[in-house]
Image (tube, rainbow, N blue to C red):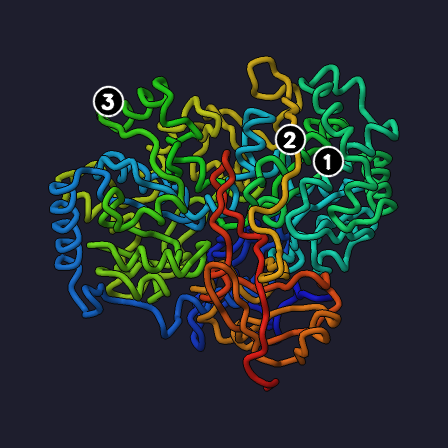
Amino acid sequence: MPFSLSAPASVMSPLPAGTATHCPYCALQCGMHVTPAETTQVEITPRDDVPANQGGLCQKGWTAGALLGSPHRLTTPLIHGKPAGWDEALGYAASRIARIQDAHGPDAIAVFGGGGLTNEKAYQLGKFARVALRTSQIDYNGRFCMSSAAAATNRAFGLDRGLPFPITDLAGADAVLLAGGNVAETMPPFVRHLNPAGLIVVDPRETATARLAALHLQNTPGTDLALALALLHIAIADGHVSEEYVAARTTGFDAVRDSVAAWWPERAERVTGVPVADMRRAVAMLAEAGNAVVLTGRGAEQHAKGTDTVTAYINLALTLGLPGRPGSGYGCVTGQGNGQGGREHGQKADQLPGYRKIDDPAARAHVAAVWGVDPADLPGPGRSAYELLDALGTPEGPKGLLLFGSNPVVSSPRSGHVAGRLAALDLLVVADFVLSDTAELATVVLPTAQWAEEAGTMTNLEGRVLLRRRAVAPPSGVRSDLEILSGLADRLGRGGSFPADPRTVFDELRRASAGGLADYSGITYEKIADQGGVFWPCPADDHPGTPRIFLDRFPTPDGRARMVVVDHRPPVEDVDADYPYYLTTGRLLAHYQSGAQTRRVADLVQAAPEPFLELHPDLADHLGIRPGDLVRVTGRRGVTEATARISAAIRADTVFLPFHWEGPNRLTNPALDPVSRMPEFKVCAVNLAVVGGGR
């Protein structure tokens, strides 16, 4: 197997049960016990009472304790790189914020958050921006992760919850189509819920997940939408329409049916590179299954047409009668640890808590009442993530930025340009536990507590709200993000409105979310502990939560799902004579996101010490590239270098770079989806040249 769920030898000895909590990494939020130990910071053991991981952990989870005792941890604030006391650092940041806003207005200060922050932090950060700073300029790195799927599911179903059913339902599915996801590497315990005999994977690479599958559709990068349209064409032409379901539970089918008539499979084969026979087999597997699920991941979504691509897969699922049927449906594989909860409670530029729209007068009135402010004082929508980063330090853009839980110098598209925009700021305040690539540019760095050092809630990919318990004390000199926001608010004249206690913040979040689409008002820490997690919506104290949504109706005005006509368009940046190869990017088993955490864990660095360039043997032979050669990868926005890894697992017209290091995202395209504002991370055009011989 390409991944391991078993314990390393170093932790096989029996241990007393420690604090029951959850992993700091992906959206599975695997359950684990954290036990203080004499020879190491903590020992990690898996929990078998959490359905998502069922007693398994991946390599990242097993080594998560190393983050807490990392020698790279910051334990004192920094001002211009020099140690400072907390009073000095918070006072300096607050005074600079006040001066900038006095000179340029509230929107001169921006806030950028992260999909790994707890619900309490995400909520408090959104409130802090709108109440303490009165700025509209707030967004978060989840815009780079979940936004296209969220936009498509809101458009189709009236509600966005990554999986609208428990993950354990997947085990009962006879067929699962996974478009653009590599769960065997990104979240290995996920594969426990999949039946390989019924698994269909869409990916330009033969990933670890594709090797598990019964069928791999190896499409050209940027053609996921054309493939989805062809699959729907085949489903209709071959008589697989669930006529009764479509008539009773959807609108828009006739227009969608007419539009996909143009995507006959032979045409799609020329565009996508996927053989017609494989397309027909995929449709038959889904249509003939007793239960079937269609899932999308970042490979299909991180495009300038990502919303339309997800819409096409939803149209396919609706045509087959899957969503809202027990054991079947459509879902999105959420990536970041709190990618779901992080987008529900106010970090996004256009949202208020409870998944309310910030330009909805009723939503503004409800949230303003909870916050004790005049609705008229709440700002309107701000810039989306890349647009916000692109505007930093410009005459019309923010002059200062507060950044929590993100590392955009590595994770943003056109990252070299973003680094320049950050450097142009008058003030950059970064809260982090290490001196990340972005923190190195900061005016003020504030050392924060880590995952096992504070309490809070996370909402995993199922929409299940979980309790992350404090297991150990943080190092002396370190404060939580909630304490940092409270301290800044005090110095900005908003004292008392921003408590630092997570339970107090969660209770306010419950009131603010009440009546919204993502209603947490009936969820308490006690209920989470008693039930092992609570699915939202949960609108009352005596409500059990909602594991499966859409069973009776969709939360649209007429209760029906909306099928929407979409059409394929090529990548914004296609290959040409100067840049003849497609570049796609993705994650590795050993690392997570920008690598700010995992690149500081010795065992993970040993497993994956450096970036590499994966290319096909035919392309390597054509260019004279040998294994281990240092290759320069050049695109229209930047250049990076990586060691060649030659593999038949990738298409001959495509190369792959993992994005956990600074460099690969210098090349990626910031072209934005017109609906979700998602950048086109997953395809751009590059050229290759050998720099040096193999090592």
Q: Secondary structure at mark 2?
A: loop
**With 250 as the anchor, is 90 left or right in this view?**
left
Q: Which mark is residue 694?
A: none
Q: Tell me the residue that label 1 is attached to.
A: 229
Q: Residue at x 37, y 36 (%)?
A: 349
Q: Quadrant of residue 479?
A: bottom left
Q: Tell me the residue that label 3 is attached to.
A: 376
Could you tell me residue 640's position as x and y percent? 49, 69
Locate the C terminus and report the quarter of the image it occupies.
bottom right
Q: Residue at x 27, y 67 (%)?
A: 75
Could you tell me residue 449's position as x and y percent? 33, 58
Q: Nearer the viewer, residue 247 or 7?
A: 247
Q: Which mark is residue 566?
A: 2
In the depicted structure, whether residue 34 falls above or below residue 226: below
Could you tell me residue 351's position as x and y percent? 39, 32
Crowd tier of the residue under label 1, counting other residues whose Cα lies within 10 Å: few below 14, some 14–19, many 20 or above: many
Kindly tell me whether residue 89 is visible in this rendering: yes
Q: Quadrant of residue 568?
A: top right
* Label located before the other in sequence (2 or 1): 1
